[in-house]
Image: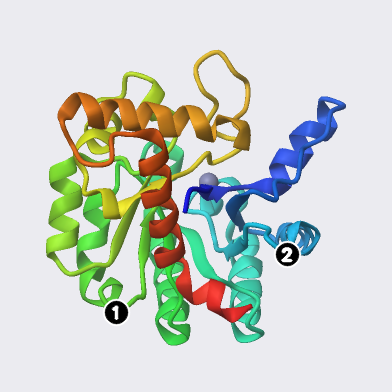
Amino acid sequence: MGMLTDAHCHPFFMIDNALAEGTGIRLPRDIAVAASGWELCQHEMHEGMARAAAGPGSAPWVLCFGCHPQQPASEGAASCRDTLDALARLAEEGRLSAVGEAGFDLYEERYRATEEAQERVFETQLDIACARGLPMVLHLRRALHKLFPYVHRLKNLPAVIFHSWPGSPDEARAILRRGINAYFALGGAVCGTRKNSRASAALLPADRLLFETDAPYQPLPGKTCSSWDELPAIRDAVAALRREAGSPRGAPQELEAAVAENFFRAYKKGLNRE
Ligand SMILES: [Zn+2]
């Protein structure tokens, strides 16, 4: 069945941006959304939006929560502790579909300076995901190598979603070969010139692809923020790259249906909860 799906976005900040611009956002009832937050107030708003979007025939919402790898540098240790405490409580209360976004960001010096703190925060989150049998949503910038010590534990998770997949198709295949039930989310970068994103869109197995907007944070060229309105452009760009490469699922509607199936498979645990 065709349905647009967004495997990673931040609706709290989409609203925040919209308020600053004096506009609003449309609550999609036809797009399945995986919303990520790192503060309790964000999660509570996502829960409210999920309830408001629910109804007969509506697309489901998936609620993710975790300590962002930039948080040790940008917000400090106390904020990370608050997030981890909230994460443990939300997981215990069954209010979570997935842990994350979590991972490592070694892109800038100020983030690299907190590498050890990022390790501690990641390990706590991996413990919670393993104990609760939840999928994880990963953010990895210049940090793919940081995963290898954790492969044996990541293999036990129901799914691992690589948000804004930064690697090449070969790196994706290496992760799958190690036995991780991995899904690779591609966003607006497929409409640009980033080589790895375009190659992954063209060549990854169709049963491992996801679409994402990371809204509002990854605008298409010429825009100031990303939104759900961009999902058709992302779908069409990935489909065109697959057609060019002669890969399966090169027709937009066919690709959309395959990616929706992947979304429901990757986030199955959270969807069954409701
Ligand atoms: Zn994000």
Instruction: Identify the element where label 2 is drawn.
Output: loop
**Residue at the spot 82% in from the left edge and 34% down from the top edge:** 24
Say which quadrant the C terminus sits in: bottom right
**Is residue 227 visible in this depiction of the protein?**
no
Query: Which three-letter amino acid code belongs to the residue tagged 1?
Result: Asn
Front-lying residue, 138 or 11: 11
- At 21% from the left edge and 52% from the top edge, which residue is drawn? 145
Q: Position of residue 208 (x, y in %)?
A: 29, 54
Q: Mark 1 points at which residue?
A: 156
The answer to whether residue 62 is left or right of residue 239 is right
Q: Is mark 1 on a helix, strand or loop?
A: loop
Which amino acid lies under the numbered mark 2 shown in the image of this protein? Pro
Residue at 76 percent of width and 39 percent of height: 26
The crowding category of the residue bearing disc 1, from other C-alpha atoms within 10 Å (few below 14, some 14 to 19, many at least 20), is: some
Which residue is more in the foreground, 116 or 16? 16
**Observer able to see residue 226:** yes
Question: Which of 65 and 251 lies nearest the eye of the viewer?
Answer: 251
Q: Which of marks 1 and 2 is in front?
A: 2
Position of residue 73 relative to residue 26, above or below, is: below
Classed neighbour count for the residue bearing mark 2: other residues with Cα under 10 Å, few (<14), some (14–19), many (≥20): few
Seen as rendered, the residue at the extreme right is 22
Which residue is label 2 attached to? 56
Residue at horizontal 82 percent and vertical 29 percent from the top: 20
Relative image position of residue 78 (x, y in whole percent)? 64, 63
Task: Classify residue 38 by image quadrant.
Answer: bottom right
Q: Where is residue 206 in the image (x, y as percent from the top left)?
A: 26, 48
